[in-house]
């Protein structure tokens, strides 16, 4: 009692796929598959909506994520996910991926701003067409077709490339330090 130890028994099972898998991405406990016909499927724990499926705490079988557009890529973090649509638009769901709320004047022990959890995918505002999505534990990044990097999420260790000013950034912010007319970002990897 009172222990931080969790007993976990993993029982291998076969996931029958009624489609041709194109790509598989993994978060800490969630797995997602992009199908060859541009649909996204996920399964795993969903208590913070990290599968992008509303209404269930555990998604035990391969379940389609409801997205309004054809999907060409995905990324999963600790408790959130991202999908890249063929149009270059990005969708996010899970912990801290919802609308930002402000608490002017603040409340003792609470931040002045926070993001809500997002049970189903919602569009992320990036002012340019996106070529790739990336997710770390509690932060995210996108690379645009122009070769620019945008990041958001937890910045506790300055992992977003925006200095120490803000511990959390709630919407994508351009990483100015990498901008140069002679340089293009082509990929990113978040830990």
Image (cartoon, rainbow, N blue to C red):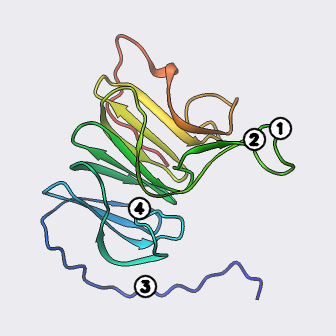
> Is any part of residue 156 visible from this angle?
no
Name the image quarter holding the N terminus: bottom right
Residue that label 2 marks? 112
Q: CA distance from mark 3 to mark 2?
A: 40 Å
Q: Residue at x 44, y 67 (%)?
A: 54
Q: CA distance from mark 1 to mark 2?
A: 7 Å
Left or right side of 89 for 79: right
Residue that label 3 marks? 10
Assess whether mark 2 and mark 1 are in contact (beta carbons under 8 angstroms): yes
Mark closer to the observer (3, 1): 1
Mark closer to the observer (3, 4): 4
Q: Which one is earlier in the sequence, the residue at label 3 or at label 2?
A: 3
The dot on residue 52 is: 4
Left or right side of 180 for 137: right
Q: Which one is earlier in the sequence, the residue at label 1 or at label 2?
A: 1
What secondary structure is marked by label 4?
A: loop
Q: Which one is earlier in the sequence, the residue at label 4 or at label 2?
A: 4
Reply above or below: 125 against 146.
Answer: below
Residue that label 1 marks? 105
Q: Which one is earlier in the sequence, the residue at label 4 or at label 1?
A: 4
Reply above or below: 149 against 65.
Answer: above
For residue 106, what is the image quadrant? top right
Q: Which one is earlier in the sequence, the residue at label 3 or at label 4?
A: 3
What secondary structure is marked by label 1?
A: loop
Q: Residue at x 46, y 75 (%)?
A: 56
Q: CA distance from mark 4 to mark 1?
A: 33 Å
């Amino acid at each position: 009692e009172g222990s931080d130890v969790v007993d976990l028994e993993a029982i291998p099972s076969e996931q029958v796929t009624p489609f041709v898998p194109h790509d598989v991405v993994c978060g800490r406990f969630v797995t997602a598959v992009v199908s060859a016909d541009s649909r996204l499927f996920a399964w795993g724990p969903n208590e913070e909506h990290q599968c992008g499926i509303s209404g269930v705490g555990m998604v035990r079988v391969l379940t389609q994520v409801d997205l309004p557009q054809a999907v060409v890529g995905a990324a999963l973090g600790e408790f959130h996910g991202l999908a890249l649509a063929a149009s270059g638009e990005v969708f996010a769901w899970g912990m801290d991926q919802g609308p930002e709320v402000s608490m002017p004047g603040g409340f003792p022990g609470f931040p002045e701003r926070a993001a809500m959890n997002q049970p189903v995918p919602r569009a992320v505002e990036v002012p340019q067409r996106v070529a790739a999505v990336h997710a770390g534990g509690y932060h995210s990044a996108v690379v645009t077709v122009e070769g620019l990097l945008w990041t958001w999420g937890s910045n506790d260790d300055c992992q977003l490339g925006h200095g120490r000013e803000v511990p959390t950034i709630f919407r994508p912010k351009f990483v100015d330090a990498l901008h140069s007319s002679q340089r293009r970002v082509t990929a990113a990897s978040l830990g």
